[in-house]
Image (tube, rainbow, N blue to C red):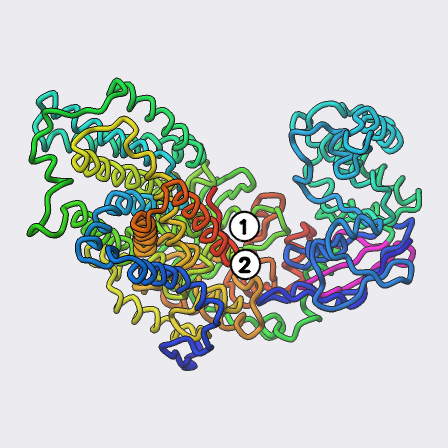
Amino acid sequence: MTMTTTIVPEKPSRPIRLGTLIQKYSTLAVLIVLFLAFAIGTDRFFTGTNLVNILQQISMLTIVAVGLTFGFAAKEMDLSVGYVVGLAGLLAPLLMVAGVPIPLAVLAALGAGLGVGLINSALVVGVGVPSLIATLAAGSILWGINFMISGGRAIYGGIPAEYLSIGQGKVGGILPYPALIMLAVVATSWFVMERTTFGRYLYAVGGNARAAELSGIKVRSYRVYGLALSSLFAAISGIILSARLGSGQPNGGETYLLDGLAAVFIGMTMLRPGTATVMGTFFGALLIGIMNNGLNLVGMDTYVQSIVKGIIIVIAVSVVSRTTKLKLL
Amino acid sequence: MSIVLENITKQWPGTLALDGVSIEVVEGRVHGIVGENGAGKTTLVSILSGAVQPTAGTLSMAGQSVAFENPAAAVANGVSLVSQEGSLVPHLTGAENICLGFEPVKSRFFINRREVQRQAETLAKHWFPDTAIELNRKVDELAYADQKVIEILRALHSRPKVLILDEPTATLPAKEKQSLWTLIRQLSDAGMAVVLISHFLQEVIDLCDEITVLQDGRKVSHLSAEHHQVTERQLIDLMLNRGQASEQHRSLNSAPTERTLADDAEIVVDVRSWQGARFHMDGLTVRSGEILGLIGLTGSGHFEFAQSLFEPRLAGEGHYRFKGRDVGRASVRDMKRYGAALIPDHRMINAMIGDWTVRENMSMAGIQEASPLGIVHAGRERTETRRLIKRLNIKTSSTETKVVELSGGNKQKVSVAKWQFASEGKYKLFVFLEPTEGVDVGAKREIHDLITSLAEKGAAVIVASSDLLEIAHVADRVVAFRNGRDADQIARCDFSEAVFINAIAGVTQ
């Protein structure tokens, strides 16, 4: 064996290209510009109450989007998350109204979410249906189920106050529980994805399944984990939603799919371009939250907000697609 | 009309696919191009048909210099390609496929279906008068042979002057091969210039008026039927013999140094009537400390056999004991746990994640060893990566460089280092497939030294390669495959290129 010494400098020796720099930080720049614009442009934006309010508003979206991130890492897309939010948000209130104790009702709702994820992954990994199609179909089925079990009506009355406090309570009278749960979910997920072998393997499966397999990684299992976590996180979000609203709504979580995907796509433009990361997704959700909140304060109509959001998604995905091989199917 | 390629060079990142190749394809003649995998045939075809642009060199047709920016430009200039497979649209009918892109129209917008049908039928009747093909059926309902006919008709629809056939008979049954051979003769009689790429050497010899032999991206020989009576054996010799062409053949000329193997060396691999879809191995044992070379022509099964020792499910039948344990049904994960490692061919497809860093790629198989409770110890990961970068002499600016940015040789070293990450001495079997594919000469030697050092530390090593000099250099013993079976065993003292080539070609001396 040749024993020539190779000098290994700590930092890459070649200059970082301007293009990479712009691409990596442009989303963050947009976030900061938006923040400053709203802070300067309106009186009510840059106040403690409103900032906490933003955290509260994005908490459910963030949790769904972080769930999607696990799926994306393994190159699986989950289009059923919105309806899983609805399912969990209906199931827990329904059971509690029927007299089931809170912990059991919560566990049942989480279990239902996990169950959907496992059925999705059985179709995707076991049968070989592309996740985009399997979860699209699952979403349609769940939408029907949600209306069936609720009779198309909101479920309320008889939901215990302890349950409602999950969505409405505040730590020390300031930080809402949903925001706290979100921060905990983001921190834990970040740790799992960036600091454990589990996260490394999940990314490996998404990066090159064949290379992962030949390195001895259980590729099929990790694809299942990705889809299962995606559904489970949606169920967590559903529980918070129903506690926050004080009722179970048959079409409660529908907006979370599109906004969740938007958060992930925006996140894919930063940090490791082309790869869904937990922190990227969190920033993506934050961007959407700040935008919604700020545009509301300026008094912009919701349909204009929707247009703006759509444009932002297109820009984000264009940035990623131009520079990396973004493949979702 | 003839097409002339002069001094064509194609440089891919890290590999020189073609190195100053000149060929001339003349009207009314069939020009065969042969060479082992990686010799540059595919790149040459891609350049001829406009799919790839050469780094240097010129193309000219009828004395006029031409440049094909894309396949459509090549077709417009009269050069058509019948590719190896999969160029048909499965849900369209044969006739629709034949006219694809050149549909006759009526009222400017609407496809004239009747005319499509008529043109397809005329073509079919003209070139395949004896074959009845259902041009109205969707092509995915047709047999392979009929699909091939449709592909050829489609290439002929644009009335090419040069027709390139890439492995046209690879999937055809014997009878259809015959009719294809007849067609090729008709085409050249009709004045077309035909380029034929094929692994079936006898077919090339029978059909071609001239033959170009490629090896490692260089033209090593050009034969024309008028001047040379060439045999299959001679052709194989030209394709594989690197003796004259290279100066790194010292191990073949100098007396081979026999490495001594302890008599009580542990048997690591023990297979008996071990078979898969494309190979059958009667029996073989490999001991610890031994390097076994596997050779054979493309498609003779030696690669599949080597791979099956790491992925036993690829075989499925027979007996395979690994260090005394029955592993005939084991998964890749089991094999890894028992101590087997694979350094696959096509490393960017099978071994690496391109936009991952050197560190992340290197730790992919062994990260759990540096991760107590499943939590990655970042410091240990980086230290271990640095140690391996140094030990294997990997040229990279840092542990955080993306692996795609490395040269072929350094990528390959990362692929080997993967199995030493926090796992020194853990693996008892290393299977290498084409270990120096796309690797420059300097790194080649280092990888050979690496292979030897693995064996010296007590691992059993199996190397399957189409580079015979490489095998001669590293192996202690060679098994030659022919037609999916292990045909010959060659001991180190008998190593010579002639012996290897005879074993591969099935010629007894």
- Above or below residue A20? Residue A206 is above
Give the amino acid at mark 2: Glu
Question: Quick one: SS at disc 1?
Answer: helix
Task: Point out residue B360 in the picture as x, y percentages from the top left corner.
Answer: 37, 62
Q: Would residue B419 be seen by someone viewing this image from the given angle? A: no
**Which residue is located at x 44 percent, y 48 percent?**
A313
Question: Mark number for residue A5?
Answer: none
Residue B220 among those drawn in magenta: yes
**Is A247 positioned to the left or the right of B291 in the image?**
left
Q: Would residue A211 be seen by someone viewing this image from the given angle? A: yes
> Looking at the picture, do discs 2 and 1 lie on one chain?
yes
- Above or below residue A101? Residue B360 is below
- Return the disc, 2 or 1, that comes first in the chain's sequence: 1
**Which residue is located at x 37 percent, y 52 percent?**
A276
| Neighbours of disc 1 within 10 Å: few (<14), some (14-19), many (20+) | many
Give the amino acid at mark 1: Phe
Task: Point out residue B457 in the picture as x, y percentages from the top left corner.
Answer: 36, 67
Start-end of magenta stretch: B210-233
| Disc 2 from disc 1: Cα separation | 9 Å
**Is B136 positioned to the left or the right of A14 in the image?**
right
Tell me the chain of label 1: B
Tell me the chain of label 2: B
**Is B432 positioned to the left or the right of B184 in the image?**
left
Task: Point out residue A214 in the picture as x, y percentages from the top left corner.
Answer: 42, 50
- Residue under pointer 2: B434
| Neighbours of disc 2 within 10 Å: few (<14), some (14-19), many (20+) | some
Q: Where on the picture, by quarter, is residue B99?
A: top right
- Residue under pointer 1: B303
Question: Contact (CB < 8 A) between labels 2 and 1?
Answer: yes
Question: Quick one: SS at disc 2?
Answer: loop
Q: Depth check: B181 or A321 in front?
A: A321
Q: Depth check: B347 or B493 in front?
A: B347
